[in-house]
């Protein structure tokens, strides 16, 4: 009888930690799948262990699909550029943490193609960026405007950060905008082959969850964040870098929403 009672208590304990919900982790086309796996596998495994919920992972192929997945409530957890948040907050998304590391966007070029960090040398040339909803795109537009080069370069869209680095090494392009989160990981011999033309101020990434996500998710994140290999994380601050990008993205989101209604 005592054994039966002990087994019953053990099963009851196990069931109390079980989760019949799925945590949907959805990420944008900022990095390759392999980079996301390297950065997030331990983090996701810890969330599963603590919450008892299964975590599914999806990397959307385009910025448009990624943004709409967030708007439609298809993501319980995600990572977004800081300037997305004000526009997406009305759709039930809430910040848990922000990055506390000095990641920036840099405009780089192969030294064998560009002799000095003079952006005017890029007049009439092609520059690779991630897409029109990316912070790389916004930074490039800012740099071109301040240098009097708006409309005088060809912007080549749709390249992940890691792909830009590879293509430049293979001389398959002149220049590109890349995150230091990727560039800093390159071996020094490879980094020495690039010249940095422009560098942004430090930029925020935000770890967000949906207000409709399983209740177990937020405490699981708080006890798992140390397993994410993407620098340090901390509480959200009110400091805005390049505030115009916030307003520009709001307009982009409104236009994207209208296009989905057609």
Image (cartoon, rainbow, N blue to C red):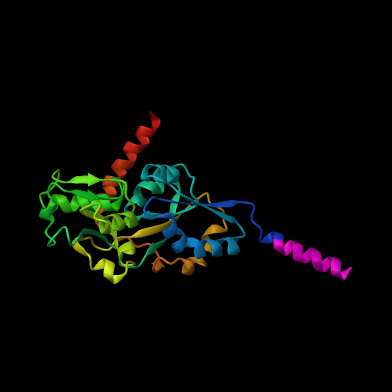
Please give the name of the residue rendered at 14% of the width and 52% of the height, measured from the top-left corner. 122
Quadrant for the C terminus in the image = top left
Where's residue 181, x and y in %? 33, 63
Position of residue 66 relative to residue 202, above or below, is above
Where's residue 134, x and y in %? 31, 50
Front residue of 131/146: it is 131
Q: Residue furthest front?
A: 170
Q: Main secondary structure of the magenta part?
A: helix
Q: Could you tell me if residue 221 is visible in this image?
A: yes
Residue 44 horizontal side relative to residue 6, left or right: left
**Image-quadrant location for residue 235:** bottom left
In the image, residue 5 lies in the stretch drawn in magenta:
yes
Please give the name of the residue rendered at 36% of the width and 51% of the height, measured from the top-left corner. 85
Where's residue 44, x and y in %? 52, 61
Q: How many marks?
A: 0
Residue 231 horizontal side relative to residue 125, left or right: right
Quadrant for the N terminus in the image = bottom right
Front residue of 205/124: it is 124
Please give the name of the residue rendered at 16% of the width and 57% of the height, measured from the top-left corner. 113
| Segment colored magenta | 1-14
Q: Could you tell me if residue 96 is visible in this image?
A: no
């Amino acid at each position: 009888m005592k054994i039966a009672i002990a087994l019953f208590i053990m099963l009851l304990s196990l069931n109390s930690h079980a989760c019949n919900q799925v945590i949907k982790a959805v990420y944008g086309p900022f990095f390759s799948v392999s980079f996301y796996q390297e950065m997030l596998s331990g983090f996701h495994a810890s969330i599963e262990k603590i919450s008892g919920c299964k975590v599914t992972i999806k990397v959307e192929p385009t910025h448009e699909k990624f943004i709409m997945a967030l708007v439609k409530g298809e993501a319980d957890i995600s990572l977004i550029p800081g300037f997305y948040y004000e526009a997406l907050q009305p759709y039930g998304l809430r910040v848990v943490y922000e990055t506390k590391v000095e990641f920036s966007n840099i405009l780089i070029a192969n030294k064998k193609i560009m002799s000095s960090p003079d952006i005017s040398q890029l007049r009439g040339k092609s520059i690779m960026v991630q897409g029109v909803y990316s912070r790389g795109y916004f930074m490039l537009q800012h740099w071109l405007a301040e240098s009097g080069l708006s409309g005088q370069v060809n912007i080549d869209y749709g390249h992940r950060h890691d792909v830009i680095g590879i293509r430049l090494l293979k001389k398959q392009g002149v220049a590109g905008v890349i995150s230091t989160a990727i560039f800093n990981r390159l071996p020094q011999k490879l980094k020495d082959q690039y010249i940095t033309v422009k560098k942004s101020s430090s930029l925020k990434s935000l770890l967000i969850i949906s207000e409709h996500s399983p209740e177990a998710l937020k405490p699981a994140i708080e006890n798992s964040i140390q397993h994410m290999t993407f620098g340090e994380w901390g509480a959200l601050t009110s400091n805005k870098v390049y505030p115009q990008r916030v307003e520009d993205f709001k307009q982009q989101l409104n236009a994207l929403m209208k296009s989905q209604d057609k």
